[in-house]
């Protein structure tokens, strides 16, 4: 399997996740990869702070909502 196919397979798998602990694990892997490349810029720190405020204020979307939007926008990934 080539790298593009692997990526699409991972995208489909992540889009179908219902387990918050797995989503957090994938997010932490992504963040650790980003941190390993460079220190956080002031812009990224600010964006993260804004995101945390949004989470505290309940300004989030459910996983089901995001999954449905993803299915509508990228139906070819859900065959």
Image: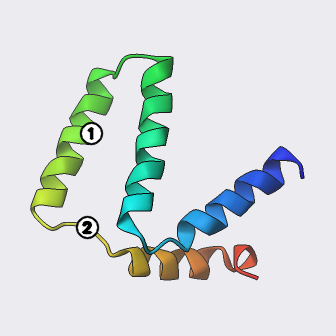
Q: From mark 2 to mark 1, how far is it between C-alphas?
A: 15 Å
User: 31 and 48: which one is in front?
Assistant: 31
Position of 27 compared to 4: left or right? left
Residue visible at 38% across and 54% down in the picture: 24
In this picture, is 22 found above or below 77?
Answer: above
* Colour scheme of the picture: rainbow
74 lies left or right of 79: left
Image coordinates for residue 15, horizontal then vertical, percent:
55, 69
> Residue 76 location, x and y as percent?
75, 76
Residue sitting at x 77%, y 53%: 6
Secondary structure category for the residue under label 2? loop
Mark drawn on residue 60 = 2
Image-based side of 40 in relation to 77, left or right? left
Query: What residue do we see at 34% from left, 22% from top?
Result: 40
State which quarter of the image contains the C terminus: bottom right
Figure quadrant of residue 59: bottom left
**Residue 47 numbered mark, or none:** 1
Label 1 Cα crowd, 10 Å radius (few <14 / some 14-19 / many 20+): few
49 shown above or below 73: above
């Amino acid at each position: 399997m080539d790298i593009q196919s692997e990526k699409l397979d991972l995208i489909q798998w992540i889009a179908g996740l219902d387990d918050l602990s797995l989503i957090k694990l994938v997010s932490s892997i992504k963040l650790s990869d980003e941190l390993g490349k460079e220190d956080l810029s002031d812009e990224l720190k600010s964006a993260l702070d804004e995101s945390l405020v949004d989470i505290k204020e309940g300004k989030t979307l459910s996983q089901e909502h995001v999954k449905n939007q993803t299915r509508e926008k990228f139906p070819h990934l859900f065959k």
